[in-house]
């Protein structure tokens, strides 16, 4: 029953071929791709877990690729990434639902935007795009507003789970020998002739090359290596998530896009919840993920235009993520012209999640052009088994699972039906906090938001990690939960 | 002469009482019934409470056992009672009603277990 | 497939009383309690304060003592108990699917089912309070478990939102455990908690209580650093601009309402009242699916456990009767609510019954000196003056069941 406890590793004292800074979806996908080669790799992140930035709070959409400007890197990687997604999710045991997306229009002005999008999509090479009438749109998605007159339907669009995908990539990378170096904010990088020396949260990590996948902090990491060719602006997106019982929309529904983004969308999640969002507001603070009154009001006001019957009484939580908007207006994925040992994977705003597999592939190609040996090794592990979920098993599978591991018979999270076995497995795979367990298992993600299972998950964390309850945090750092009584 | 305002807790009416002490005489105003009169006098002269808390248990299946003062203790002694409970430990097994601290904080009242606790 | 006559889902106060009464009513029947926790008693286990049992046992008990009064009756009763067992599904034809470490996956065919799953707490997410998402925001009941069962303190400087009884009790418990409670904020102009708790939990400990106030913002990135509290307009319940005040604290406790835990009920296709969020039941607490009964906080949220026990004995007895005699027949009278009454339970009764019939109800506002009236057509079945009624306290009236001949209407009238 007890698998060895994995997770944070002390960095290797020798020299890494590649240090990837940032363990969001971009860094983790690159780590996974490169882990299939012979390269020795460190995956570094400032936070206590992977997927702690924009990768844990975004729209979870696998975009079709019609709204990126023609000829942009975004367009190319979006369409390519979308094609790669099925295989990646299959190999990594991550949910993917190709539920299709609709962009809806209400008047002539919207219809013009939709026609432009349709043409752009055609030029970007998006397959199966179609302009359809309001009536046809409502046949696909009956919950739509009756006033919709025209819609752009993209059947290749879908939904996934962004933090599950990030965790899965990082786990697959680790299975192939990649070291995770967490709780390690990069504070400086020495550019020596023979190697790069990275100072990160008390660690010193030596590497031949650095991949900069530092999200909203990518400009700062780049500057540490002498390259100040771009800046990153944080853009907040707020969301509201509703209980599964309120889900009545099973297609991704966009409104016609504006300058600031793809508009407020209404979308199901792979777990069967419904969410509305995101807002799009530029801000100065890269870590400000506060939900605002204005944001909630905007989401409520705008989302009912798409789906009039949304049940806001079923909201179980609201949250916000911060996207990395690059000053260049496009993804920055290239060898730095200032420091040739730096490969940028920066400015990854939307559609960054969709593009991640293609970004990883492109980084590999760039390295190949740089003369790095990135040929795949024979014994590379491609598959990453998902944690087996009690709630999705049939009766005989449940019986077998309990017979093998009785902890499958103890349900800890009653809202989401998560067993103790899944929680223990998540901890053994690297969860160190309540939120770490939550992202890996969904314990605490249901309607009671951990009110019932929170103390129980804390006890299991303490037991498995040989800690006391005051050592357990919500999400690392100073997010302690309880103190000793005296 | 000393006047104190208080809420009567004996029924949902929650009468606002004005209790005035003038030498030996105590006057209660604002009450709607005789019980309120008695409550006002008691609260002014000798307020008492039942104190409940939990005590550490050694060798038990659970780390704590809930306890209470077996009767009312003077309100002014609550802090001392709580301190005495915090400073002591029970040893499993513990039976409901078992005296865990006799004459707590000199009040003449015992601390008793309000639940059973099995040993490991 | 296991077979039981009566299966009770939940081993808290409702489930315990229902099971005991079912067995008393029909000693030959096999009665089973399914409890998801490792111990019986439900939420009473962590309610270590006193104030329970004044009505039901005519003496003042703590939560664990109250629970023990029922648990000790199980000994030698023949009632079977599976603890650490989670019910996953309930079907219309009373098949129960459950799982536990000890028993694995179990399917049970039940003659009758009593739903006694209790309720859960409303969360910050449901309130949609803006701000950051740091550690340190707990529902009051979650904090209560941490303090009373685990022996740890959720924080040192506390703001409580909501003045329901759990919030008041936890304000005192935190103070008694060494924390400082800076404020209890209540959105409404009155508390839904008992006067006794306001006095003995707050006044005794010099904890300020502000009515018409709410938390409008949560601050702190990793651990809570403070909350913004604002006064609300008593009419609109919206924050008054300019009244905001930042209070430094590391802990926010939420006591903002309880929601019956009816996912299994809904899964079985049982009709739910939008007002109580519990099943619609008749006077025997039978739902609209034959042979499935409900009682306690899963049916409607009670303020006194004594009432839960009383209701559960009705449901437990009825479940045993159902197994013996099948469904009741005869004309049904609806219990409608009129002016001032938010809801009444049961929502329907069989006409022409025997004995006494208790109707429980809640008013929709605080009322003084109003009359409670129960009408059946032109007939006034009951007319009683009440000094005070508040939404926080459940009211009960008793009538002669044989007088029910048609639909009933319960309402308040001027004194």
Image: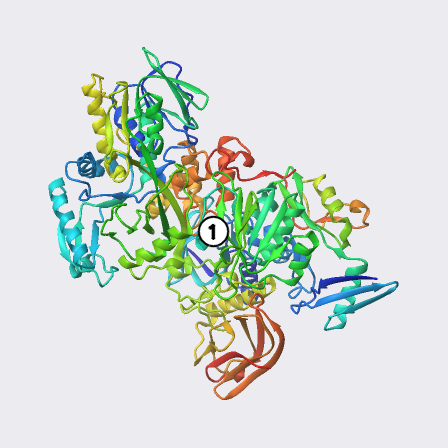
Residue B57 image point, x, y percent: 66, 40
Tell me, yes or no, if residue A99 can be seen here.
yes
Note whether A442 is above or below C33 in the view shown.
Answer: above
Horizontal relation, residue A58 to residue C262: left or right: left
Q: Residue at x 15, y 53 (%)?
A: A112
The residue identified by callout 1 is C124
Q: Chain of mark 1?
A: C
The image position of residue C220, as x and y in percent, is 49, 41
Q: Nearer the viewer, residue A186 or C259?
A: A186
- Secondary structure under badge 1? helix
**Residue lying at 19% horizontally and 24% vertically, measured from the top left:** A365
Residue A129 is at least partly visible in this image: no
Q: Residues within 10 Å of mark 1 (few under 14, many from 20)?
A: many
Residue at horizontal 76 percent and vertical 45 percent from the top:
B80
Task: Give the answer, above or below, for where A175 lies relative to C3.
Answer: above
Q: Position of residue B25 (x, y in %)?
A: 86, 66
Note whether C271 is above or below A225 in the view shown.
below
Q: Position of residue C273 (x, y in %)?
A: 43, 67
Residue in the foreground of this view, choosing between A165 and A340: A340
The reply, left or right, for residue A145 in relation to residue C221 is left
Residue found farthest to the front: C242
Relative placement, left or right, of A342 versus B7 is: left
- Residue C331's quadrant in the figure? bottom left
Quadrant where the C terminus of chain A sits is top right
Q: Residue furthest bottom?
A: C378
Of residue A418 and residue A31, the one placed in the foreground of this image is: A31
Residue C264 occupies which quadrant of the picture?
bottom left
Q: Nearer the viewer, residue A147 or C361?
A: A147
């Amino acid at each position: 029953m007890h698998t060895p406890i994995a997770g944070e590793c002390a960095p290797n004292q020798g020299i890494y071929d590649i240090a990837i800074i940032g363990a969001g979806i971009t860094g983790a996908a690159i780590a996974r791709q490169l882990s299939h080669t012979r390269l020795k790799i460190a995956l570094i992140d400032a936070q206590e877990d992977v997927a702690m930035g924009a990768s844990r709070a975004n729209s979870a959409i696998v975009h079709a690729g019609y709204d990126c400007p023609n000829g942009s890197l975004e367009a190319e990687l979006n369409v390519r990434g979308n094609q790669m997604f099925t295989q990646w999710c299959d190999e990594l045991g991550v949910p993917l639902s190709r539920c299709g997306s609709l962009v809806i229009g209400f008047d002539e002005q919207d219809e013009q935007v939709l026609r432009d999008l349709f043409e752009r999509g055609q030029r970007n090479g998006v397959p199966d795009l179609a302009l359809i009438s309001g009536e046809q749109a409502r046949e696909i998605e009956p919950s739509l507003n009756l006033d919709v007159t025209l819609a752009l339907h993209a059947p290749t669009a879908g939904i996934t789970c962004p933090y599950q995908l990030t965790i899965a990539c990082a786990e697959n990378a680790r299975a192939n020998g990649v070291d995770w170096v967490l709780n390690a904010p990069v504070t400086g990088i020495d550019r020596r002739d023979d190697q790069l020396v990275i100072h990160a949260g008390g660690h010193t990590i030596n590497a031949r090359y650095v991949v900069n996948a530092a999200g909203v902090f990518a400009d700062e990491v780049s500057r540490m290596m002498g390259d100040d060719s771009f800046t990153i602006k944080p853009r907040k997106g707020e969301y509201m998530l509703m209980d599964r019982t309120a889900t009545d929309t099973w297609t991704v529904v966009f409104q016609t896009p504006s300058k600031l983004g793809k508009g407020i969308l209404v979308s199901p999640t792979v777990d069967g919840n419904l969410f509305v969002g995101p807002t799009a507001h530029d801000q100065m603070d890269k870590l400000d993920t506060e939900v605002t009154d204005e944001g909630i009001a905007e989401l409520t006001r705008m989302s009912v235009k798409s789906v009039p019957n949304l049940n806001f009484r079923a909201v179980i939580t609201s949250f916000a993520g911060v996207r990395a908007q690059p000053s260049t207006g496009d993804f920055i994925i290239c060898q730095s012209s200032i420091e040739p040992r730096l490969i940028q994977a920066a400015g990854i705003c939307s559609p960054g999640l969709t593009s991640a597999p293609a970004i990883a592939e492109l980084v590999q190609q760039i390295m190949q052009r740089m003369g790095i040996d990135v040929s795949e090794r024979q014994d590379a592990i491609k598959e990453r088994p998902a944690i087996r979920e009690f709630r999705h098993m049939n009766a005989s599978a449940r019986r077998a699972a309990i017979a093998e591991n009785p902890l499958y018979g103890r349900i800890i999270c009653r809202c989401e039906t998560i067993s103790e076995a899944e929680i223990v497995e998540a901890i053994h795979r690297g969860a160190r906090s309540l939120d770490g367990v939550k992202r890996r298992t969904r314990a605490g993600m249901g309607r009671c938001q951990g009110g019932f299972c929170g103390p129980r998950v804390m006890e299991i964390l303490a037991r498995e990690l040989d800690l006391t309850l005051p050592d357990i945090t919500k999400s690392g750092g100073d997010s302690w939960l309880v103190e000793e009584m005296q | 002469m000393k006047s104190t305002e208080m809420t009567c807790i004996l029924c949902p009416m929650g009468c606002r009482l004005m209790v005035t002490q003038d030498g030996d005489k105590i006057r209660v105003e604002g009450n709607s019934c005789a019980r309120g009169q008695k409550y006002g006098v008691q609260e002014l002269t000798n307020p008492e409470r039942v104190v409940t808390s939990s005590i550490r248990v050694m060798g038990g299946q659970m780390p704590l056992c809930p306890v209470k003062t077996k009767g009312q203790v003077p309100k002014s002694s609550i802090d001392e009672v709580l301190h005495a409970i915090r400073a002591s430990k029970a040893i499993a097994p513990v039976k409901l009603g078992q005296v865990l601290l006799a004459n707590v904080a000199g009040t003449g009242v015992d601390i008793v277990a309000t639940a059973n606790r099995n040993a490991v | 497939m296991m077979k039981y006559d009566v299966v009770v889902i939940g081993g808290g106060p409702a489930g315990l009383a229902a099971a005991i009464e079912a067995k008393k009513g029909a000693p030959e029947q096999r009665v089973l309690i399914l409890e998801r926790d490792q111990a019986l008693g439900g939420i009473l286990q962590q309610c270590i304060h006193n104030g329970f049992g004044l009505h039901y046992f005519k003496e003042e008990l703590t939560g664990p003592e109250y629970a023990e009064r029922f648990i000790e009756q199980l000994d030698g009763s023949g009632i079977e108990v599976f603890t650490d067992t989670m019910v996953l599904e309930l079907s219309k034809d009373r098949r129960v699917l459950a799982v536990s470490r000890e028993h694995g996956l179990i399917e049970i065919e039940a003659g009758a089912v009593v739903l006694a799953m209790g309720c859960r707490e409303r969360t910050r997410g449901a309130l949609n309070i803006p701000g950051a998402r740091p550690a340190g925001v707990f529902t009051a009941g979650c904090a209560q478990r941490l303090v009373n069962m685990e022996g740890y303190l959720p924080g040192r400087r506390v703001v409580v939102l909501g003045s329901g009884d759990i919030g008041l009790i936890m304000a005192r418990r935190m103070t008694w455990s060494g924390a400082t409670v800076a404020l209890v904020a209540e959105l409404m102009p009155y508390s839904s908690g008992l006067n006794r708790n306001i006095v003995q939990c707050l006044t005794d400990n010099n904890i300020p209580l502000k009515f018409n106030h709410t938390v409008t913002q949560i601050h702190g990135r990793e651990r809570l650093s403070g909350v913004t509290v604002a006064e609300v307009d008593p009419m609109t319940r919206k924050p008054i601009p300019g009244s905001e005040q930042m209070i430094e604290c590391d802990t926010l406790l939420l006591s903002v309402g309880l929601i019956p835990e009816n996912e299994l009920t809904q899964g079985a296709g049982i009709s739910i009242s939008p007002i109580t969020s519990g099943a619609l039941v008749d006077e025997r607490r039978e739902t609209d699916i034959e042979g499935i009964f409900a009682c306690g906080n899963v049916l409607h949220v009670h303020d006194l456990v004594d009432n839960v026990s009383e209701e559960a004995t009705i449901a437990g007895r009825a479940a045993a009767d159902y197994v013996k005699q099948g469904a009741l027949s005869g004309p049904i009278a609806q219990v409608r609510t009129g002016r001032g009454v938010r809801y009444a339970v049961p929502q329907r009764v069989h006409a022409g019954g025997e004995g006494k019939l208790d109707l429980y109800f809640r008013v929709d506002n605080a009322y003084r000196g109003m009359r409670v009236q129960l009408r059946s057509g032109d007939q006034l079945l009951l007319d009683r003056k009440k000094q005070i009624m508040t939404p926080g306290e459940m009211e009960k009236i008793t009538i002669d069941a044989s007088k029910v001949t048609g639909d009933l209407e319960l309402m308040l009238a001027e004194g």
